Amino acid sequence: MEYFLQQLINGITLGSIYGLIAIGYTMVYGIIGMINFAHGDIFMVGSFVALIVITALGLTISTGLGLTILALILVLVTAMVIASVFGWTIERMAYRPLRGSFRLAPLITAIGISIVLQNYIQITQGARVKPLQPIISGGYTIMTRVDTNGEFAVQISNMQIMIIVVTVILMTIFSLIIAKTSLGRAQRACEQDRKMASLLGINVDRTISMTFVMGAALAAVAGLMFLLYYGVIDFFIGFVAGVKAFTAAVLGGIGSLPGAMLGGLVIGLIETFWSAYFSIEYKDVAAFSMLAIVLIFLPQGLLGKPEVEKV
Amino acid sequence: MIAKIDDAVLTVEHLNMRFGGLLAVDNLSFDVGRKDITALIGPNGAGKTTVFNCITGFYKPTEGRITTHHEDGKKFLLERMDDFKIPKIAKVARTFQNIRLFSGMTVLENLMVGQHNPLMVASNYTFGGIFGLKTYKTAEKKAMDLAKYWMDQTRLTARADDAAGDLPYGDQRKLEIARAMCTNPKLLCLDEPAAGLNPRESEDLNKLLMFIRKERETGILLIEHDMNVVMGISDHIVVLDYGKKIADGTPEEIRSDPKVIAAYLGVDDEEIETVEQEIEEGVSS
Amino acid sequence: MTDETIKEANPGWHLDAGKVAKDLVVTALLATAIFGSTIAYKTVSAEGGLALETRYDIAFYIIAAVVVGRLILWLAVWSRPSGHRSPVMPANMKASIAFLTTKIGKGFATTMLLIALVFPFLPFTDRYLLDLGILVLTYVMLGWGLNIVVGLAGLLDLGYVAFYAIGAYSYALLAQYFGLSFWICLPLAGILAAFWGIILGFPVLRLRGDYLAIVTLAFGEIIRVVLLNWYWFTGGPDGLSGIPRPSFFGIDFNRSESGFAHIFGLEYSSSHRIVFLYFLILALALLTNFVTNRLRRLPIGRAWEALREDEIACRSLGLNTTTVKLTAFATGGMFAGFAGSFFATRQGFISPESFTFIESALILAIVVLGGMGSQIGVVIAAIVMIGGFEIFREAEQYRMLIFGLAMVFIMIWRPRGLISTRIPSIFLKEKKAVSSDMVSQGEGH
Ligand SMILES: Nc1ncnc2c1ncn2[C@@H]1O[C@H](COP(=O)(O)OP(=O)(O)O)[C@@H](O)[C@H]1O
Ligand SMILES: [Mg+2]
């Protein structure tokens, strides 16, 4: 029971990270029907930028709490801005020229961009894994159990609290943006019917660009969280995290924001429990199999609208 | 008013199709005679295409029974059949309101794909065909002959080797019909085949349909908006409005039916109410 | 001189300086954000954690290069009067171009085949070139195999390498555990790969195009992770070594009395085996091509292409689209299986590292860049890609970067691939190539 509870907490933390990445997939897919294959690598770039800023600021575990929070906000904002620039530029250079072309064409360029980003970071930042000493320490013990095997404590670290809190805050902000602002309205209009939206005077190109920017910004947040949580990153983390986040987006119902978050949580939990109870080596297999199973039995996802074949 | 048809190739009984809150087809029953041209008419959104989609298996009806009857007495329940088996086994072929051709393939290739199933058997499911067995060669020749036959009937022979997507609109419509006929159907369902045709092409189409009925002994179920076409060539007309059948009978009967006039034959909005009122009064009195 | 002629004479004439300046400033800012962050700073391990290394100079040069490059683009390319940008080709001209490419294509294909046949015996062909030739042919074969799935049937498969891996491991394991020879394992590997194609295909082939792509990608990864972790059976990351080399239909390539050289009265040379491997993969590739061309003229092949064009129409004509997809998947998988067992016998050693996603992406890129469905396009693309890869061998680090960039640029330059006309599978009077505007790329278009 205690072990289960601990895994639950870990799973929710991991799921928050996947959920943040999944939002980028879901928004882009919703608006232009394209799998932005390079999105996972934007997450990776965001993570590296965060690492650079943290190193530049000389942030360590001994930095005071107030200063740490301020510094982390700075790190977060920088990573979000830089990742957004990456996202915007990629959309502009590699996807927009192919809009209205065949579906395969932008997918191939997205794969190309993914390869470019991975190798670009490998060249500029080195191929080895980057370890980061923990910055945030401490936590709370929720319950302890003492039995013949010794003591087992269920803990939630400050790190985990921060990840979950930041995720909830950002989710709320972005949901509000989509629900309340004209940008959100434009996005929903473009999702429904791009041609009609442009006839009604919506700047479709700008709306799509902004979608990429928002997705990239959230991916950068996830990148920072991942960095702080695991303490190691390399240029390849984007691929696997990307596939899992995409799974999350599909599981939640592609096109649906709450769905992406929910899907992220489910994938995070599955992965954590699988590692905890079965085998850690096959945790990726579990996540990938999950993707296949979801797509086959629930192609519209948990919160998505069922799609009717128009004949 | 139910027109009872003795020798029906298709019977539709109590068909219901629901999309969420919308009942697109509401308790619809009608028959299609074996060698008849039956027209299914009604205003836009009345549910005609939906009926076709139920008959040809693209939608699974919410309720109801759809049966085809072959001359040899075999019966097939279409609402339980996989969509691809309906043309293959129950021998019901269709065309689409928005033309669906294999536009990157030539006219001839389109017609060959229409004969996929017999050719597949002739090629021993590819294993014989790949070694160039004679049986397949002969079967292919026969298939070519059938394709040529239909190209001649639709006057597409000169364009046999052109991409289907390159054809003018009218020819594309005809090619879609020819392709459906290559499956040797007992019943041919045509969804607005005359839409977008000029009067001459429309005339050609009528001739083609008459030819199919007469020479090929194929029943035709036709969705059509052009009243001249409908009245001119159909043996039997079914009228739909808001998913419900409001009339069913010969062209003469339909022509004089006040409900049809009200719902369909170009009555102004205000007049409809008065006409409907009159009808209701007529019924109650 | 009229305005028009001035514009033509000076491409930069009507440039709006303000607009260009603004664009350049934006470019500079973006470039600064992108390169100023990741090139100017690098985290390096240091005592007690990480330290930053700065490279402002390199970052500055790159940013400057981007801005100057953009300026040059403005001046040289984007400033042309708009009417000159893309002349619209009349339809009959398009048709004649299509006709011409098919004519050239035929001659070209024959020439390529002849070159391929004499290649090992050319005076300048050394061991290195021969190995490169084998590599190119392997990718040509894989490209042709994937072409069935992607080019003909229009199903996007991002996990094709899984079948390649299954083929390779099938041969290696069958040889290791049962001592079976290459010539028995070759068909078995193909059958096993096809079988896996069907197992995987059954559930997933109902999915829409890009979902299918992701699931196949996941499948490829699953296979790789399993190979990596199933230590006692597959050797895990250590791979399998000592895979038997192929024999000349039972005659080994060695110095012994019963060796190839002795029996054929030749002086022993280690290159015999390489030349044999070369012809082996050439034969396998040609077999793939031959079978594909045959299948295209059979109902099954036409059904694949019809499926790519319009799945719903297929079903309305009585085609069981699930079967049609499965056969495409299985056939494509089978050829990858053949290629895989060839790979295993050639290398003598295999490990999961050879079967990563990048490999799938490379094969897919060859198919798409070549022009989907075009057999000769695959050959050209394979030569360009693998050859290009070799040219940049020196720049080891930058190789993949350049590869990725090339993928993006070629796609934007020619979304349809290099050769995009389609040759009909059957004709009444004359075979006319179908222009690419008509041909669909499957699933939703
Ligand atoms: N797949 C579907 N999902 C939801 N509603 C549908 C679907 N197909 C048709 N409808 C609805 O059913 C009604 C009848 O449509 P349709 O059969 O196309 O009409 P018709 O062909 O007579 O013009 C319309 O209101 C249409 O919006
Ligand atoms: Mg309709």
Image (cartoon, rainbow, N blue to C red):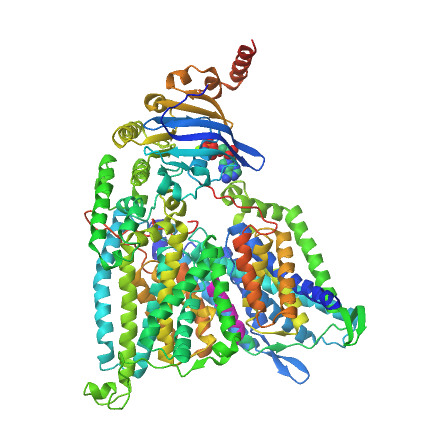
- Image point (38%, 51%), residue name: C308
- Image point (33%, 21%), residue name: B232
- Magenta stretch: includes residue A113: yes
- Image point (23%, 54%), residue name: C99
Instruction: Indicate left or right for B137 with A297 as reference.
Output: left
Residue C365 seen from this side = no
Give how far across and how far down residue A301 sits, in percent.
Answer: 58, 52
- Image point (63%, 63%), residue name: A270
Instruction: Indicate left or right for B284 with C105 as reference.
Output: right
Query: Foreground: C434 or A273?
Result: A273
Give how far across and how far down residue B114 sits, in percent.
Answer: 31, 44
Give how far across and how far down residue C177 sits, in percent.
Answer: 42, 79
- Residue C138's image quarter? bottom left
Please tell me whether residue B238 is drawn above or below residue B170 in the rendered image.
above
Query: Foreground: A154 or A149?
Result: A149
Query: Foreground: A160 or A287?
Result: A287
Please tell me whether residue C368 is drawn above or below residue B254 in the rendered image.
below
Residue B92 seen from this side = yes
Prevailing secondary structure of the magenta residues: helix
- Residue A264's image quarter? bottom right
What residue occupies the far top of the structure in this picture? B285
Q: Give the range drawn in magenta.
A: A110-123
- Magenta stretch: includes residue B88: no
